Image (spheres, helix red, strand yellow):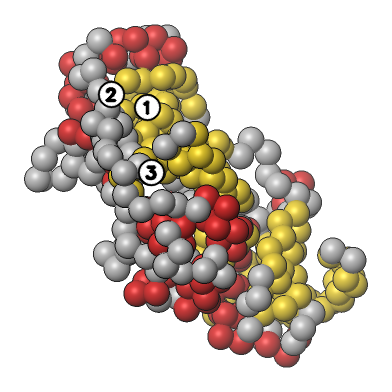
Amino acid sequence: MRRIRLTVAYDGTAYCGSQIQPNGATIEEKLNEALRLLTGTDCTVMMASRTDAGVHARGNIAVFDTEMQMDAGKFTFALNDRLPADIRIQKSEEVPPDWHPRKQNCIKTYEYRIFNSRVPDPLVRLYSHFCYYDLDVEKMKRAASFLIGEHDFKSFCSARSQSENTVRTVYAVSLERNGNMIVMKISGSGFLYNMVRIIAGTLMRIGTGMWPPEKMHDILAAKDRKEAGPNADAAGLTLVKIEYEKNLQQVLRAENEEWNYVLDQRETESTGRTFFLVKHCLDSEYSGLLMREIHQAWRNGAKEIYVADAEKPGRLKPGQSYGFYTLQEIVCLERKVDGVNISQWARTENPKFSPESMEE
């Protein structure tokens, strides 16, 4: 059995989202139909990112399994011959049979387009949000700067979301005006349900002068959906690309008002050991931080994870559990992480679950 990865572009106007559902046509449904016509078997695609009704994509990722021996690159043209004109495969390639599009470290990039004018333009209505009020892009840029970094984005998550972990990392946000069109581009480790559209709605409130740019900081800190702006129209949103990590990052760092940590993965691939140092963390955020980062280390291939607390060493004790992970013992191991000498580490290994059972 082979696994084929597709890069998929689509105009989401006529669809009820990417994921199969009973109330209307979806992108997955159309891809599955095309695969059935091509292969003669029931193939089911698995997509990297689920998009809502009316949302577009230039570079969503999907995989499917097949015994068909066609050259991987030719699936692009064969499927496009069987797909509607508003869905097109941009690239097809073979990947390892166990490669999973939602279990890889990646950077997702979205664009949100705002048509800012007194009068709507019917030629852009399907691909932008119309805003009648004058928007100050400089104020929106200042507000967007508060989003950079790793934060709890609970304020920007729809109440319908099923995500228990609302922490995400935003790597970059830009806003540019070209005539009447304002384009926001945002890149991050992943996004919560409706997160980009709520960010866009909040930035528009700030752009009109209803709120000051500093309001964005307060909204983040509140962790309350009611504090943020409205959910902007789906038509303005496009998933631009998904870039998968080719090599494991050696050292990961994150710092905000609530936590500061270092995840040292320099030995992960050679010895299976990863070192996680907490430099600062509020007590209220401690359990969630350890749960997330120990799980991330395990997903990245660690067999043994060593945890140290430079701020309050006494917070770590054998037998403590963080999600699926339990601290086994305190070991003496001299190690310098991010310039900090640590000799006492809490070791954890052998989680109580199969990694395949957890889907991000």
In this rendering, is residue 171 above or below 16? below
Q: Quadrant of the C terminus?
A: bottom left
Q: Amino acid at mark 1?
A: Val
Q: Secondary structure at mark 2?
A: strand
Could you tell me residue 290's position as x and y percent? 60, 73
Could you tell me residue 206's position as x and y percent? 46, 62
Give me the residue at 74% from left, 64% from top: 262
In this rendering, is residue 30 above or below 69? below
Residue 116 badge: 3
Residue placed most toward the observer, 291 or 98:
291
Residue 270 badge: none
Q: Answer whether residue 244 is visible to the viewer in this image.
A: yes
Q: Quadrant of the N terminus?
A: top left
In the rendered structure, the answer to whether residue 302 lies left or right of residue 11 reads right
Could you tell me residue 135's position as x and y percent? 44, 52
Residue position for label 1: 8
Q: Are marks 1 and 2 in contact (CB under 8 Å)?
A: yes
Q: Answer whether residue 189 is visible to the viewer in this image.
A: no
First in sequence: mark 1 vs mark 2: 1
Q: Amino acid at mark 2?
A: Ile
First in sequence: mark 3 vs mark 1: 1
In the rendered structure, the answer to whether residue 54 lies left or right of residue 355 reads left
Give me the residue at 66% from left, 70% from top: 256
Give me the residue at 77% from left, 83% from top: 311
Mark 3 or 1: in front is 3
Q: CA distance from mark 1 to mark 2?
A: 7 Å
| Residue 332, picture quadrant | bottom right
Residue position for label 2: 87
* Furthest-front residue in this view: 118
Residue placed most toward the observer, 22 or 121:
121
